[in-house]
Amino acid sequence: MRVILSLTLLSCLLAGSLSQEDPCDVKFLVTAPKIMLAGTTEKICVDLPSGSEIELAVTLEEDNYSWLRIDNDILAEVIYQMNSERECFEFEVPMVRENRQRCKLIVDVRSMPDSEESCNRSKSVMVNNDNLQTLIQTDKPIYKPGQPVKFRMMSVDKDFKPSNATVPLIYIETPNDIRLAQWVDVQPNRGLVDLEFPMTSEPLLGDWTIKVEFEDRKAERTFKVEEYVLPKFEITVESQPSYILLTDTSIDVKICARYTYGQPVQGNMMIKAEVSSYRNSRPISLYEEETGSDGCTTLAVDLTVFELRSNRHSTWNAKLKIKVDVSDAVTGESLSHTADVAKVSNDALSIRVNTPSTFKPGVPFYGTVNVNYPDGTPAGDKFIMLSVKAQETGNYRYRPIFSENFTSPASGVIEFTIPDININTTSLSINAEAPGYSDRDSANNTQYLIYNPYDIAGLSAQYSPSGSFIQIEPIRGKLVPGSTQNLNIFFTTDTAEAENLPFQFVFMSLGDLLDVPVSEALSRRRRQVNGEGEGNGKETSISFLLVLLGQGPIKATAHLKTVRDQIWNKSQFAHFLKM
């Protein structure tokens, strides 16, 4: 009999890991960062279910997968000894030849003290030399001849702390790669370098480049030098909303003309409105307006002129385009401006089912549905129908297993849970639809049909060598450092002794493994998931307590160990090497 149990636990997360299956005598789990920073100390943790004494050799070597090289240079090798169920070790990551070097982390485990046999496992990791990121900023993107170029730079580490290390070389190049200025061995002031370059009155026009060179990395930033004259006033055009539907009959467009110092322009506006698309053969509209006291006018554009629903015209990449010619009544100056103010959409809503491509049979499934307007803004207070169908082993037909109606919140994100998925399920089809928009019955054969907005996601069942699965219930909302957090974990197993299964936890924050204490158990419940309905499983109380640290975000993963120590099961967010 297969049973499912849910435990209330606390949050934790796994980085990359190595797992073990037969024929090795020693069962072990090694947890290490999947991305390592060269020149730093990383933490590697080892779990031994038996608590036996072992010798652990950890080797980091280059992963040369090119046919030109078949040998791999060993970068670091460390030997540890342990005789407890869990220990963490410091691992010095050496510098590598490339900024991003693909490497292999090899773990060799040998039982102590006299065993001749060992288990050798490996996993790919990435070692980054580029621990610092260099940021360069100019005081403006475009300069006129004779204007000084003021710029600053800063290098920050992975924790966004500024570096005070000396900058070996900073220089400026013209568009034809001539170096006009340079600074050598610049010392930052609290991590910041402020510099200025006096531009000549007759410089070479085009893209200039600021370059910064370190021993192991480079950074650059471009700016333009142009001869330009600022216009005396500017024109802005915007619509609300920034999209139009095929069924809309009008849209308000606000057009404003203001001097560069902010005062309104008084004058005349000649306006041309059209819908541009792949086949641009639609009629156009012309308007003439006077600016108001604020320099603006609001124009109600008649959309019926553009025959939006006629299938004689293409709706692909269709946009409402407004061209405005403004004449200043005071100075006589004229200025033109063209803008795409609204896109044409066939659907009143954009619905997207956000789920992974796979699911775990026998445990709850969690997903979200994003409901937005065509311009991407969240659509709240919208009625959405969600339905789920499942395909099971030996049956090619999909059968309904779940349905629920939702009203989208102000964020437009609907969170849903599929509580019961048969352990024999092989595929899921999740459909989200907004009813009430279709007019297929009233439309004629010269019009585009309007359909209900919808989205469908297809998922396939994950594979587990043990046939068991573990699922962490998502945490809704934000976590507060210093607080405690409960987390439900669901898992399936064949064994009748599942109530006594121990859990191991690994915590990670900003890529670093943390030592975080977890208390005793909180609660446990049991039910059957063999497709025959609920069972009378025994209920047990357990408790776990985790205090969230103030070091940044903490993510969580739990590792399930079977009673017979056959495997370490794959858990959410964890990447295991099959062994």
Image (spheres, rainbow, N blue to C red):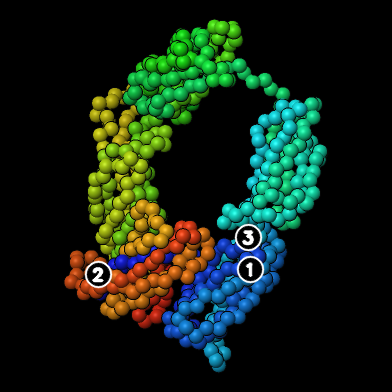
Q: Is residue 405 above or below residue 463?
A: above
Mark 2, residue position = 525
Few, some or many residues within 10 Å of mark 3 (<14, 14–19, 20+): many
Q: Is residue 172 above or below residue 40?
A: above
Q: Residue at x 33, y 74 (%)?
A: 520
Q: Residue at x 48, y 75 (%)?
A: 29
Q: Which label's residue is closer to the chain start, 2 or 1? A: 1
- Across and down, in percent, residue 432 comes to 31, 44
Secondary structure category for the residue under label 3: strand
Q: Amino acid at mark 2?
A: Arg
Q: Residue at x 75, y 46 (%)?
A: 170
Mark 2 vs mark 1, CA separation in Å: 44 Å
The residue beneath circle 3 is 128
What amino acid is found at the position of numbered circle 1 in the picture? Val
Report the residue that reaches farthest toward the bottom.
114
- Alpha carbon separation for disc pair 3 and 2: 45 Å
Q: Position of residue 155 (x, y in %)?
A: 65, 51
Is residue 356 visible in the rendered image? The answer is yes
Q: Is residue 577 left or right of residue 358?
A: right
511 vs 238: above or below = below
Q: CA distance from mark 3 to mark 1?
A: 10 Å
Q: Residue at x 36, y 52 (%)?
A: 477
Give me the disc on residue 454: none
Pointer 2 local density, CA inside 10 Å: few below 14, some 14–19, many at least 20 = some
Residue 136 as seen in the image, left or right of residue 8: right
Label 3 vs 2, first from the N-terminus: 3
**For mark 1, what is the residue?**
93
Label 2: element kind:
strand
